[in-house]
């Protein structure tokens, strides 16, 4: 009979248009308590619901909420204020307004049978509900704010959808419940949503994350402890039906302010903590790219069989951000070793950054555990002075995958060494080699991209002048250009001579300058640019060809080349900027002539000698900063450390390494010596004025080292056969230049002379 009355009332209200009729019907059904409840629901109703939610829907929701208040013992003890705000509401966020209360009340009634308190009932629901409705965590859901109906249709939901279901289930049996979340963890690792239930006080739990130990536990507690109430994006909010000014920051609908909220950060945060001295490395393992997470034993190795942490990865219904976390010292490097069944695979661990970094490893991309790499790691675990140079692991042959891992490991070790050794000179901005000292000033622009900042070396004018004048030119140079992104660096020439930027000591000082910035400031080694004005432009003419393998692009402003050759610029984009009236030393005429020469070289050697020439008519030595167009032009280029064709021409300052060729110390070098080397498939051809012996520096970026190679030197076959990748080759490369992009994994000595 009561059911018939309810249906009759619903049918009547379905025909009534004004939502105010709902309040009158609620009072008729439940007296003054019904009127207050209906009025509260309507007064704080989200604006979009006023034209779409029917009085029939509202009355059914209210009837069932009152029924729960009568039928469940804990519900009767709930204060009216909490009942109205956290039991009665028909929605949690802005999810579709589907009816859910009757269905969930029927399911929940069975699950909470035997529970004596609201906490026990909430635990029972969290343990059994999600299997009953067949919905579990999965990032393949349609949208975050799914209703119960939508989530059941998919069988998938993420933390927000799961929280909606648990909040509604708790409300269906009279437990005050609300969704809680943060738009962004203070460590910037994303957002999260969970649930709070009231049992004399508020307690939290993760939805579909039942913990037999009780409430107020969760994988996210350490992250929540870092929340900041004074920074809205890092704060923690709880949903509320009552509108008191604040709104819940829904990351899926950032401009939507229709869901009321209260800031509950103080319940979770541990106060403004000092920066943590440890990094908390999170680890996830996926079966394939775009696939599913899998469970594996994972350990962090900082030496062969030296396990500094061990745990299990999470999968299945665990939240995406629920992962094992390892407390490690920032800078830790080594391996993540995963074990699935009887199979063991490794992931090279780069130096761990401070904070809360996360590693996403893909099982199909991992490589089998390697004995030789374990031995190499053991070798690296020794103090640097105690590492035997003849260790077998340095000479052992490596597969391509092993070579990649060895490169990462040795680079991390070398970078850490430089970070310790070079810290003081970087802080002082002063490098001394022999009797020459290089100082610099720098400015940083923009945010560093994932690969690292670019580096702009900008050389000042002056030369053959008092130190005070050259200092003034230096101070002007630091203000002259502003890249959109990068570290813009103006060095002070070590001398005050006319050729201050192309004396022999500059090469080693600049290499150390680059190494320091790669190691200590995270500069991307393939994004280092060279430029200079006036006497600095003289330096660009000279340094760019002979150090072309160090830079991504170079620009010369108002300088004179003197005797410098352009041949070494084959793989270095090069720009010339000159005032049309800058006639001193015939600078304008020479610039035009060199531009014509670059045109010819580019035509004769397709793909090489990329260049740009700007002669500004009517301008003299000062170009009114029009030459700043060099910056965006250069920024388009990245260095290729492994070009398939190189032209090496020795200047009056001799270089022993150029791209993938190196002349060993025992072989003589001469000025104006020219070598042309090309790679065609597996054949390397080297021609020109060849020294007696050469070292060919090899990488799989140049050719396939798993196949035999042939070297033809001076028209004759100097070598044919396989080569071995070795850690020793990587070590010697890094000792010369502290960056992995140009490091060789094999070094092949070649006799260029006929037998």
Image (tube, rainbow, N blue to C red):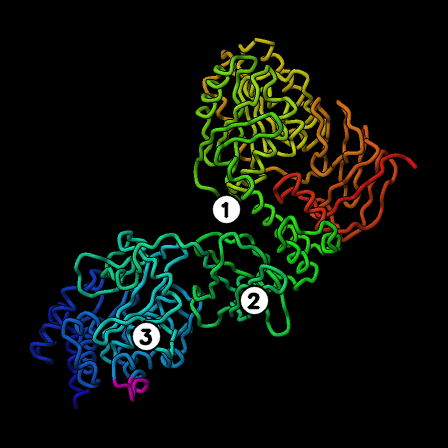
Q: Is residue 145 left or right of residue 260?
A: right
Q: Which residue is mark 1?
A: 450
> Where in the figure is residue 191, as x and y percent of width and height?
37, 59
The 10 Å Cα crowd at callout 2, few under 14, some 14 to 19, many 20 or more, is: some
Q: Can you see residue 730?
A: yes
**Sequence-first tag of 1 and 3:** 3
Query: Which residue in the protein does label 3 denote?
Result: 215
Callout count: 3
Mark number displayed over residue 94: none
In what element is the residue under mark 1? loop
Quadrant of image for the N terminus: bottom left
For the residues labelled 3 and 2, say whether their Cβ atoms are less than 8 Å apart: no
Judged by depth in the image, the label closer to the viewer, 1 or 2, is 1
Give the left or right position of residue 584, taking residue 281 as reference.
right
Q: Which residue is mark 2?
A: 287
Image coords of residue 308 (percent x, y): 54, 63
Left or right of 218, for residue 295: right
Q: Is residue 592 above or below residue 113?
A: above
Instruction: Please state the extent of the stretch shown in magenta in the rendering.
Output: 109-116
Q: Nearer the viewer, residue 172 or 424?
A: 424
| Disc on the earlier residue, 1 or 2 | 2
Q: Residue at x 36, y 53 (%)?
A: 274
């Amino acid at each position: 009979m009561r059911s018939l009355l309810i249906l009759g009332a619903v049918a009547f209200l379905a025909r009534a248009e004004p939502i105010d009729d709902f309040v009158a019907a609620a009072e008729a059904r439940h007296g003054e308590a019904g009127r207050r409840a209906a009025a509260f629901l309507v007064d704080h109703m989200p604006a979009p619901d006023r034209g779409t939610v029917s009085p029939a829907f509202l009355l059914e929701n209210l009837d069932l909420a009152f029924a729960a208040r009568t039928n469940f013992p804990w519900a009767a003890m709930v204060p009216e204020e909490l009942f109205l705000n956290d039991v009665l509401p028909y929605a949690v966020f802005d999810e579709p307004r589907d009816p859910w209360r009757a269905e969930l009340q029927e399911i929940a009634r069975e699950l909470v049978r035997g529970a004596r308190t609201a906490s026990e009932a909430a635990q029972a629901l969290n343990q059994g509900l999600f299997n009953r409705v067949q919905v579990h965590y999965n990032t393949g859901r349609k949208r975050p704010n799914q209703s119960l109906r939508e989530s059941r249709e998919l069988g998938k939901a993420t933390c927000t959808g799961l929280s909606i279901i648990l909040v509604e289930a708790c409300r269906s049996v009279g437990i005050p419940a609300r969704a809680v979340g943060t738009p962004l963890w203070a460590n910037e690792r994303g957002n999260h949503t969970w649930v709070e239930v009231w049992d004399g006080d508020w307690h939290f739990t993760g939805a579909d994350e039942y913990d037999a130990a009780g409430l107020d536990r969760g994988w996210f507690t350490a992250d929540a402890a870092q929340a900041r109430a004074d920074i809205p994006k890092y704060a923690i909010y709880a949903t509320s039906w009552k509108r008191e000014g604040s709104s819940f920051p829904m990351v899926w609908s950032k401009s939507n302010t229709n869901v009321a909220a209260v800031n509950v950060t103080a319940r979770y945060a541990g106060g403004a903590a000092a920066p943590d001295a440890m990094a908390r490395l999170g680890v996830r393992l996926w079966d394939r790219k775009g696939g599913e997470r899998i469970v594996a034993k994972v350990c962090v190795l900082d030496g062969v069989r030296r396990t500094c942490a061990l745990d299990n990865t999470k999968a299945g219904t665990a939240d995406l951000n629920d992962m094992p976390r390892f407390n490690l010292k920032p800078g830790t490097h080594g391996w993540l070793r995963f074990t699935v069944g009887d199979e063991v695979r490794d992931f090279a661990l780069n130096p761990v950054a401070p904070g809360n970094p996360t590693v996403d490893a893909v099982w199909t991309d991992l490589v089998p555990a390697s004995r030789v790499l374990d031995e190499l790691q053991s070798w690296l675990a020794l103090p640097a002075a105690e590492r035997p140079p003849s260790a077998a692991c340095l000479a052992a042959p490596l597969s391509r995958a092993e070579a990649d891992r060895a490169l990462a490991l040795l680079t991390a070790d070398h970078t850490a060494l430089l970070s310790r050794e070079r810290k003081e000179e970087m802080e002082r901005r002063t490098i001394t080699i022999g009797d020459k000292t290089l100082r610099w000033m720098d400015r940083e622009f923009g945010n560093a991209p994932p690969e690292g900042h670019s580096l702009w070396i900008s050389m000042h004018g002056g030369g053959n002048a008092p130190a005070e004048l050259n200092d003034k030119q230096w101070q002007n140079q630091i203000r002259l250009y502003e890249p959109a992104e990068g570290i813009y660096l103006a060095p002070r020439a070590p001398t005050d001579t006319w050729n201050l930027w192309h004396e022999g000591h500059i090469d080693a000082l600049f290499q150390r300058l680059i190494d320091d910035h790669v190691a200590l400031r995270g500069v991307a080694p393939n994004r280092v640019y060279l430029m200079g004005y006036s006497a600095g432009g003289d330096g660009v003419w000279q340094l760019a060809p002979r150090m072309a393998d160090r830079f991504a692009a170079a620009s010369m402003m108002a300088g004179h080349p003197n005797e410098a050759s352009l041949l070494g610029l084959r793989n270095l984009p090069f720009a010339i900027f000159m005032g049309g009236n800058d006639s001193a030393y015939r600078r304008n005429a020479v610039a035009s002539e060199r531009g014509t020469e670059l045109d010819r070289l580019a035509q004769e050697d397709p793909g090489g000698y990329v260049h740009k020439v700007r002669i500004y008519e009517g301008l003299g030595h000062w170009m009114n900063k029009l030459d700043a167009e060099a910056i965006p032009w250069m920024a388009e280029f990245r260095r290729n450390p492994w070009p398939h064709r190189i032209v090496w021409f020795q200047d009056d300052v001799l270089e022993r390494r150029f791209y993938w060729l190196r002349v060993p110390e025992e072989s003589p070098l001469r000025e104006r010596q020219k070598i042309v080397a090309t790679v065609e498939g597996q054949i390397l051809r080297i021609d020109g004025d060849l020294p007696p012996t050469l070292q060919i520096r090899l990488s799989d970026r140049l050719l396939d080292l798993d196949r035999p190679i042939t070297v033809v030197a001076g028209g004759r076959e100097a070598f044919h056969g396989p080569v071995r990748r070795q850690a020793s080759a990587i070590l010697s490369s890094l000792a010369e230049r502290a960056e992995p992009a140009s490091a060789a994994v094999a070094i092949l000595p070649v006799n260029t002379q006929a037998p």
